[in-house]
Structure formats: C-alpha cells, structure tokens
Amino acid sequence: MDGILAEVFLFPRGLIRRFLVVERLIQRVIAWMPDLIYHRFNRFYPSLEAAMSRYPAILELVSDDIGQVKAHSSRLAYLYHRATRGRILRKAQGIVAMGHEIADKAAHYKKPMVIIGSSVDLSRYPFPQVPHNSNPRLVFIGAQPALWHGLDKIPLLARQFPSWRFDIIGLFGQADIPLPVPSNMVLHGHLDDYRNIMLQADVAIGTLALHRKGMNETTALKVPEYLAYGLPVILGYRDSSVPPEAPYVLQLPNTETNVADFLPAIEQFVEKWKGKRVPRTEILHLDVHEKEKQRLKFFAQILSKWNSP
C-alpha cells in the first residue's frame, strides 16, 4: 500500500526459533511507537506483554484458544498456554471477539469488547446470474483439512441424492473423505480460481461438525464469500455473521448425526433454492467496509480511554 512501509518476519518451525523471531518483531513494533497495537491472540510472549504495558493493545479472539492448543499442540505447549494466557488477556485494553461464544469465555476479564464476525468485499462480487441446472449443484470449499469441517458427512448426502452434484474445493484426502468417493462428488483439489464453480452452484455447504472442536459458534470466512456469490448455505453450527433465522441459512443442530437426521429438511431447502440467489440487500451487513467502521469506532473508544487523564 502506498505510504506504508512493511517488514515481513517469517514464522519459523521450532518453538525457540519462533520466540526469537517474535522477540525481534515486537522490538521493532516498540521502536516504531504505535498509537495502538492490534494483535490476533495465540500465545504468551514476554516481549508482547512488555509492549502492551507501553501502548494500548486490542486482542482479536478468533476461536477457543484453550481447546485449539489442547487439540493441536504438545502437552508442554498446552500447559504453558494455560499458565500464561491470562497475563496477556489482563493486559489488553479491549477485545474484538469473532463470536458470542468466544466473547462469553473472555467476559470474566471485564474488558471493553465488541463482536465483529467475518466480512467480504462485496464490490469484488458483481451480483451473479442465477444458474439453470437441471439438477441441484452443491459446493464446499475449505482452506485446509480439519476434522470439524465434517466432510465425511457429505458422502452420505451424495449417496442419498444421487442426482445432485457436489463440488469439493480444497486439499482433502482419505482421512477427510472416506473412500470410495461417490460418483456425484467431484474433488477439485486446490484451485486458485474457483469462480466458475461458485457461479454454477445452487447451494453451499459450510462446516458440519464444529462439535468436534468443542464449540457451538464461530465465524467462517467461507460463509460471507458463499453469500457474496448469492449462495444459500447449509450450516451445522451457529455462525455469528448471519442471523440464525435468515431464510437463506439452513441451520442444522451441532451434532454428529445432524446430516443423517435432517435429510428431508436438507432436500426441501435445496429444492427451494435451486435456480435462485440470495438478494444482495440481505447481506449488506457482511460488507468489509461496514465491519471496518465498527472496528475503527472501537479503536477510537479504546484510544480515547487510554489518553484520558
């Protein structure tokens, strides 16, 4: 971006090397003398705690960090995180939470807080024409394999509705989608450009197994993008970006058998939306410009409180 100097610090493997890189990064931040620090919280770093003592800091909470560290890190890393996370959270001047469930888990720190879900730049998505498929087409996209995507539930749908087509975008393998893959499921792998697939789809599929992560609510980047293409969405969790009663969302229970138990409801939803698009007026609240107005307003509130005598 013009007028802004940027320095990139590569995040290496190995805990010690990572700590050394973060130390260098934060020392540069301190030397820069920022008005405010905005940090996506992941773990405790001593230098970060020092920086937060000198400058107002807002933490962004995107998930249940305790559950995530427990599921994906060593026991030593988990114990370290449990023992130190409170030091950073107590230092924060404010918190931006990506969902109500995340906010509730941080409420006892009694920090100013705002809930801001995922967004999308709607100006980059001209309102699409409706598809004219003889049979419904459904699409799922994922950035990386994860158990809570619930991809293993989609073959059940594909076998139950053999006339439907399912386009799966992302690097997924047998661990994510049990073999054999039904003939009406197309695994595209990673795609840099998947616009045509989205434009041809009737309905999108979101995360179906967030319960495996010990969560009931989150906000996923894929949901605003689906809606920017005008695609109604099947969800197996509460997404804080969209109203649960929205007609363009089929809200399944957050259970292991949610797909198997609600096949008639899924069929009715898909048939209802086939050949239709979600009106753009229904999703204006997801536009990045609206979300960033909320964020900047919160920044101003925190700065005003910090600078008050």
Image: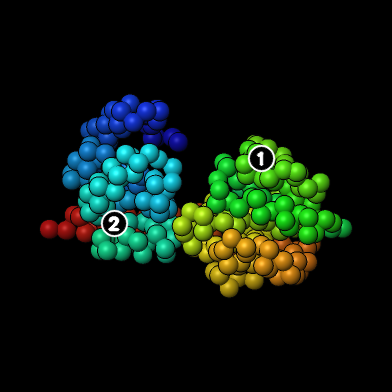
Q: Position of residue 102 (x, y in %)?
A: 40, 59
Q: Indicate the quadrant where residue 294 lies.
A: bottom left
Label number found at residue 144: none
**18 relative to 272, above or below:** above
Q: Position of residue 178 (x, y in %)?
A: 68, 45
Disc 2 residue crowd, few under 14, some 14–19, many 20+, Cα 10 Å: many
| Residue drawn where x is 61% and y is 48% of the image | 124
Q: Amino acid at mark 2?
A: Gly
29 or 35: which is nearer to us?
Answer: 29
Q: Position of residue 266 (x, y in %)?
A: 71, 66
| Residue drawn where x is 62% and y is 44% of the image | 176
Q: Marks 2 and 1, Cα distance to the nearest angstrom? A: 42 Å
Q: Indicate the quadrant where residue 80 lies.
A: top left
Q: Position of residue 16 (x, y in %)?
A: 30, 28
The residue beneath circle 2 is 94
Disc 1 residue crowd, few under 14, some 14–19, many 20+, Cα 10 Å: few
**305 relative to 247, above or below:** above
| Residue drawn where x is 72% and y is 62% of the image | 277
Residue 55 left/right relative to 124: left
Assign the N terminus to one quadrant of the image. Answer: top left
179 or 165: which is nearer to us?
Answer: 179
Label number found at residue 174: 1
Q: Residue furthest right?
A: 134
Residue 224 left/right relative to 156: left
Is residue 152 among what the camera can see? yes
| Residue drawn where x is 47% and y is 59% of the image | 215
Assign the C terminus to one quadrant of the image. Answer: bottom left
Q: Amino acid at mark 1?
A: Gln
Q: Residue furthest left?
A: 309
